[in-house]
């Protein structure tokens, strides 16, 4: 599932760029252009060419990807785990609207 999460994130991130954004990256920031293209890097810059898609860094980006697909989504397993842990902490204090 993590490979799919990285690929999905990569495509959505690229699709958010306008043609002008892509042109600016290509002409003024070629190193960013080369790594931001779909299927090059995934969540938090993890390289998709790495066969081990279980690497994790920057939990906030996994959480953001998970939440961007709507509560209850299984789009990002790490993001889902992070949200579950946050909900446990919040539920200890008060009721969490996302978790209920």
Image (cartoon, rainbow, N blue to C red):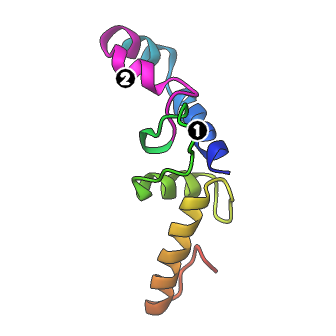
Q: Kindly state the secondary structure of the residue where label 2 is placed.
A: helix
Task: State the extent of the magenta-drawn residues as a range.
Answer: 25-42
Mark positioned earlier in the residue sequence (2 or 1): 2
The answer to whether residue 40 is magenta is yes
Q: Residue at x 36, y 14 (%)?
A: 30
Q: Which mark is residue 32?
A: 2
Q: Residue at x 32, y 16 (%)?
A: 29
> Vertical placement of 52 versus 13: above or below?
below
Query: What x and y, as percent, mark residue 99?
Result: 60, 77
Query: What x and y, as percent, mark residue 41?
Result: 49, 33
Q: Residue at x 44, y 25 (%)?
A: 35
Q: Which SS does the magenta portion mostly show?
A: helix
Q: CA distance from mark 2 to mark 1?
A: 22 Å
Label 1 crowd (10 A; few <14 / some 14-19 / many >=20):
few
Total number of numbered labels?
2
**In the foreground, 37 or 53:** 53
Label 2 crowd (10 A; few <14 / some 14-19 / many >=20):
few
């Amino acid at each position: 599932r993590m490979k799919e999460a990285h690929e999905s994130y990569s495509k959505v991130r690229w699709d958010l760029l306008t043609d002008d954004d892509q042109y600016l990256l290509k002409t003024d920031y070629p190193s960013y252009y080369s790594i931001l293209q779909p299927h090059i890097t995934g969540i938090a810059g993890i390289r998709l060419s790495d066969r081990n898609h279980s690497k994790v860094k920057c939990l906030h980006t996994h959480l953001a990807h998970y939440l961007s697909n709507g509560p209850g989504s299984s789009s990002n397993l790490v993001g889902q785990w992070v949200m579950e842990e946050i909900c446990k902490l919040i539920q200890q204090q008060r009721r969490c609207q996302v978790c209920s």
